[in-house]
Amino acid sequence: MNTKNMQEQGYGLFAKFLHWGMAIMVIVLIAVGTYMAGLDKTDPSKMQLAGMHKSFGVIFMLFAMVRVIWSRVNQSPKLPNVLATWEKLLSKTVTGSLYLLMLAIPFTGYAMTNLFGYPVSLFGLVELPTMFAKKPELALLAKQAHVIVVYTLIAALFAHIAGALKHRLLDEPEADVLPRMLPIKPRK
């Protein structure tokens, strides 16, 4: 892919900001969530971490909604023509799954919090509307769903990264999609 093609088929600055900002956020949210889940219920830092985790989860959910809207308003670059039909289908499936999971994770976290009888607030400054009444038995299901969706996202992220690296390192240069999202030179 020459430089002109890369520029024509590259993502814009805002799309790159959302992509990489959310990538960093999801890594931190998963790390903090995993660490927090391992803490004893009586550990005072658990509640502080939970509050931060929920607040950044709300921000992540807002970014995910903006990202979905942005992807519908702004056309994504076309996949390279040299990709096989199955690769294009797999790419679209993984991308669609990522969008769905990026919305499902904060939704299940929000639901879990409400169902356990707690409000969701943004850094303790703004209390968000309660979407679900307290129902501890459903809260346990929401908690399980939250964990399952997180692990599913991790698997989808690995598929996403593996596909991009495959196209960069193993396929013909025209299949390289990484320069569309990273400031690197296309392969020759």
Image (cartoon, rainbow, N blue to C red):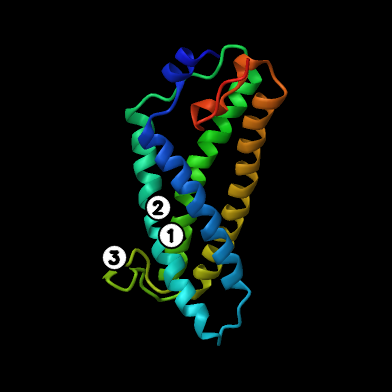
Q: Is residue 157 left or right of residue 116?
A: right
Expressed as whole percent of the image width and height from the top left, the position of residue 30 reads 56, 59
Residue 51, by quadrant, is bottom left
Q: Residues within 10 Å of mark 3 (few under 14, many from 20)?
A: few
Q: Is residue 133 left or right of residue 29?
A: left
Badge 3 amino acid: Pro
Name the foreground residue: 20 vs 38.
20
Q: Residues within 10 Å of mark 2 (few under 14, many from 20)?
A: many
- Which residue is labeled 3 in the image? 129
Expressed as whole percent of the image width and height from the top left, the position of residue 75 reads 38, 24
Q: Quadrant of the C terminus?
A: top right
- Which residue is labeled 2 in the image? 61
Which of the two discs, 2 and 3, labels the residue nearer the N terminus?
A: 2
Residue lying at 53% horizontally and 34% vertically, measured from the top left: 95
* Residue 84 visible at all: no
Residue lying at 68% horizontally and 15% vertically, measured from the top left: 172
**Nearest-to-viewer mark from 2 and 3:** 2
Q: Residue furthest left?
A: 126
Does 145 sit above or below residue 124?
Answer: above
- Which residue is labeled 1 in the image? 57
Does 161 sit above or below residue 28?
Answer: above
Badge 1 amino acid: Gly
Residue lying at 35% horizontally and 51% vertically, measured from the top left: 62
Do the residues under discs 2 and 1 have CB atoms within 8 angstroms?
yes
